[in-house]
């Protein structure tokens, strides 16, 4: 029996004994992105400036997330914007096509699309790039922009509409978490942080927050009142103590259900924010602390019960992102 089969069986046994773990290489994930440029023109109908997409490079670039951050920052200094990072090359190619037709009032030809998942839900957000002529350095103005989800067509509508108001939609991402990691890249290069300087005090606060994560009392209980057909409803709750949630921080939490006798899993993700962030996510007070409750829905499988939940999370502010230790909760 070869090595791959042994690894497969080992992962299966870990799930059966309610000890989920990452059964994959410890190497960093590979991401994909492409670069493009923007132009600026006067809209004669409104007498205001609008931006347009141009010079989309054909090459799909791949690398680690850290490499994406470096390439993104380097490109901005010469007027190039990196769109991504995407978790798969097909996603990057699909996005590349959508930007190609942005602002043209021409529908993307069906034969050019890699797939026709028009009903699939994707994740995206707005940025506001600014530059004198978009030929030199580009920065981003800090604007409220939480992660939005919708179909591919809804993303295109947002992308086309935003160009008239000098806003650029970024996406569409299959993964909510990847969309948030992309947002961090643009937030890191806002006007206040365009010099890539590190605010040591803010970063220290974020590190303290990360150390307190394991001490939180996270609870997940089955919700008796369930309005979703073919879904399990579970109530997630925790008490964020005083002095925990940094005022300029985001915390992204992903909860994945693990089923008995099944390799299937189902995930729900959400974002919380500090008091000085204006992105319209649920706000957690630094001085007072907050009890946070969220009802989440997971796939209902035939004759398969949920054994437990893996809770993964990361936090970030304008200058740093920290991956937190995962927590596994067994269903009682």
Image (spheres, rainbow, N blue to C red):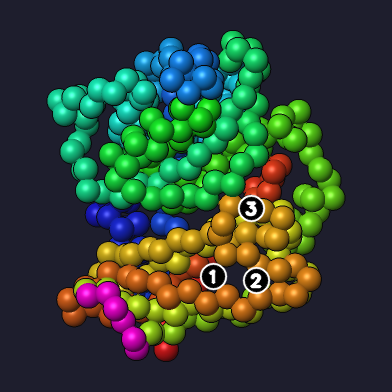
Labelled pair 1, 3 in contact (Cβ < 8 Å): no
Labelled pair 3, 2 in contact (Cβ < 8 Å): no
Residue at (21%, 43%) from the top-left corner? 117
Q: Earlier in the sequence, mark 3 or mark 2?
A: 2
Q: CA distance from mark 1 to mark 3?
A: 28 Å
The residue that disc 3 covers is 278
Which residues are drawn in magenta?
224-229
Labelled pair 2, 1 in contact (Cβ < 8 Å): yes
Residue 327 circle label: 1
Residue 36, position as x, y percentages in the image: 47, 19
Residue 291 showing in the rendered view: yes
Left or right relative to 227: residue 176: right
Secondary structure of the residue carrying numbered label 2: helix
Crowding around mark 2 (Cα neighbors within 10 Å: few <14, some 14 to 19, many 20+) is few
Which of 50/280 is in front? 50
Farthest-out residue, left? 111
The residue that disc 2 covers is 214
Residue at (26%, 48%) from the top-left corner? 120
Vertical comparison of 42 with 12: above or below? above
Farthest-out residue, right? 201
């Amino acid at each position: 029996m070869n090595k791959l089969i042994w690894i497969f069986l080992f992962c299966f046994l870990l799930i059966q004994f309610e000890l989920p773990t990452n059964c994959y290489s410890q190497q960093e994930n590979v991401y994909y992105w492409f670069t493009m440029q923007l132009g600026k023109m006067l809209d004669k109908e409104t007498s205001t400036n609008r931006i347009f997409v141009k010079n989309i490079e054909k090459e799909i670039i791949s690398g680690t997330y850290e490499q994406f951050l470096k390439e993104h920052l380097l490109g901005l200094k010469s007027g190039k914007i990196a769109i991504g990072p995407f978790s798969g090359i097909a996603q990057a190619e699909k996005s590349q096509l959508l930007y190609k037709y942005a602002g043209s009032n021409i529908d993307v030809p069906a034969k050019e699309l890699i797939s026709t998942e028009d009903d699939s839900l994707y994740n995206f957000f707005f940025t506001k790039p600014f530059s004198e002529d978009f030929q030199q350095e580009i920065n981003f103005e800090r604007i409220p922009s939480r992660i939005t989800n919708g179909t591919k067509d809804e993303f295109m509508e947002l992308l086309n509409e935003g160009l008239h108001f000098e806003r650029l939609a970024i996406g569409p991402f299959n993964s909510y978490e990847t969309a948030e990691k992309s947002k961090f890249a643009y937030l890191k290069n806002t006007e206040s942080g365009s010099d890539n300087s590190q605010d040591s005090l803010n970063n220290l606060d974020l590190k303290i927050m990360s150390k307190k994560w394991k001490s939180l009392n996270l609870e997940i209980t089955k919700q008796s009142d369930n309005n979703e057909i073919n879904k399990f409803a579970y109530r997630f709750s925790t008490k964020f103590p005083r002095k925990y949630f940094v005022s300029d921080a985001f915390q992204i939490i992903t909860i994945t259900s693990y089923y008995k006798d099944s390799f299937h899993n189902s995930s729900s993700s959400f974002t919380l924010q500090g008091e000085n962030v204006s992105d319209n996510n649920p706000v957690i007070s630094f001085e007072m602390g907050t009890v946070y409750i969220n009802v989440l829905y997971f796939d209902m499988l035939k004759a398969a019960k949920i054994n437990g939940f893996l809770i993964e999370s990361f936090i970030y502010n304008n200058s740093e992102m920290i991956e937190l230790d995962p927590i596994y909760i067994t269903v009682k």
